[in-house]
Amino acid sequence: MGLERLHGEFRRRVKTQKLAAERGRGTGSAFQPRSQRPDQVAQDRRLAEDRRRDKPAHWGSGMTSIGAALTVVLALALLASPLAAEAQQAAKVARIGYLATAPAEAASPHLREAFRQGLRDLGYVEGRNLVIEYRDTEGKLERLPALAAELVALKVDVIVAPNTVAALATTQATRTLPIVFASAGDPVTSGFVTSLARPGGNVTGLAFLAPELVGKCLELLKQVVPGVSRVAALWPPGGQGERTEKDMLKEAEVAARALGVRLQFVEARGPGDFDRAFSEMTRVRAGALTVLPSTMFFVEQRRLVDLAAKNRLPAVYTSREFVDAGGLMAYGPDLADMFRRAATYVDKILKGAKPGDLPVEQPTKFELVVNLKTAKALGLTIPQPVLGRAAHIIE
């Protein structure tokens, strides 16, 4: 109603100015001829009547109406601002490519879930402001190049490579799309980055530091099986970058000499080689086994653990997932923590950071996991110093 009264007052003033202008025309005098005075009186009466009808009861109430109207307008503006910002933000949907080496990381689905949880913690929700394009090799690693090329063709915002072999495939597929690796063995020797501090290029992420782990694992194995003189080292040629493999094998040899044990390297290029590899271990009378880091071994962890138990070989691994599957013990970084942290890299890149400017992170959380049930089955007693270092003990 206040706005209607304002409109009425405006119409009244326009009418007044119009009548005054008409009276001033003609002679140019402020006084009209006497013959026109009755008409002027009638017009003035009509004008007064219009003013009484249109004028608000109190001018103050009119001001109040204006204030109320302004308040409503301002309130609507304030409400609309965040809604517009939210709508703009919702319109920005991030697209991530995820190149996996097994369906839902079948050997350890919690790793993919750890990455997704990391994204959720940063405000990303699949189906709302995030789309993840999953591509799985289903255990057939030879499919990696084609699947990596497929993700590149989709022009996703960033590609996540969970491990070294996935990172190798993606770096060969693109030199422009950002790539984040969640657990690369040694990204420098593999050629992914120039250095850990200054990666350069389009790749960054978290390093597994595989060569250094080999010596630690042998040291633990010697403590658990103190009388062992020959240890088999299962490794997959071509499973890592060439330089990484050389460094890893060299580290193993140095550690073995320091511990006074003979190291027998046994190759397994694929799951089809496992039976032959364990037969060779038996032939050379290996007293224990160390399994070097490998994506293929990780995917086939259950079978490797079963073969070690069948051949009564105490074995050490580089990730706790093998121990969860029944292996004797493992020493290495917390992979779930690394996958959660990989989400932070993705977030920074989506917000404009360049991969080459983001330093590669090294593991900050290592853990020793021991399976006492497996130790008992092998007739072993785990020394107390080893148990004291264990972050997790499975009984």
Image (spheres, rainbow, N blue to C red):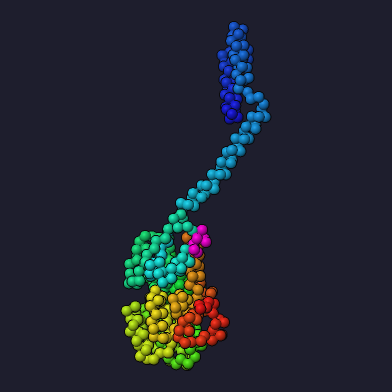
Q: Is 120 colored magenta in this rendering?
A: yes
| Residue visible at 39% across and 61% down in the picture | 133
| Residue visible at 41% across and 72% down in the picture | 107
* Residue 319 seen in the current view: no
| Residue visible at 63% across and 12% down in the picture | 31
* Residue 23 seen in the current view: yes
Q: Is 56 colored magenta in this rendering?
A: no
Residue 347 placement (x, y as % from top left): 49, 62
Residue 326 placement (x, y as % from top left): 44, 78
In this view of the protein, which residue sits in the foreground, 266 or 394?
A: 394
In this view of the protein, which residue sits in the foreground, 255 or 125?
A: 125
131 w.r.t. 33: above or below: below
Which portion, as a residue range, is magenta?
Answer: 117-123
Image quadrant assignment for residue 179: bottom left
Image quadrant assignment for residue 244: bottom left
- Judged left or right of residue 113, residue 391 is right
Quadrant location, the N terminus: top right
291 w.r.t. 199: above or below: below
Residue 219 placement (x, y as % from top left): 50, 86
Q: Is the magenta stretch mostly helix, strand or loop?
A: helix
Residue 229 placement (x, y as % from top left): 44, 92
| Residue visible at 46% across and 82% down in the picture | 374
63 w.r.t. 55: above or below: below
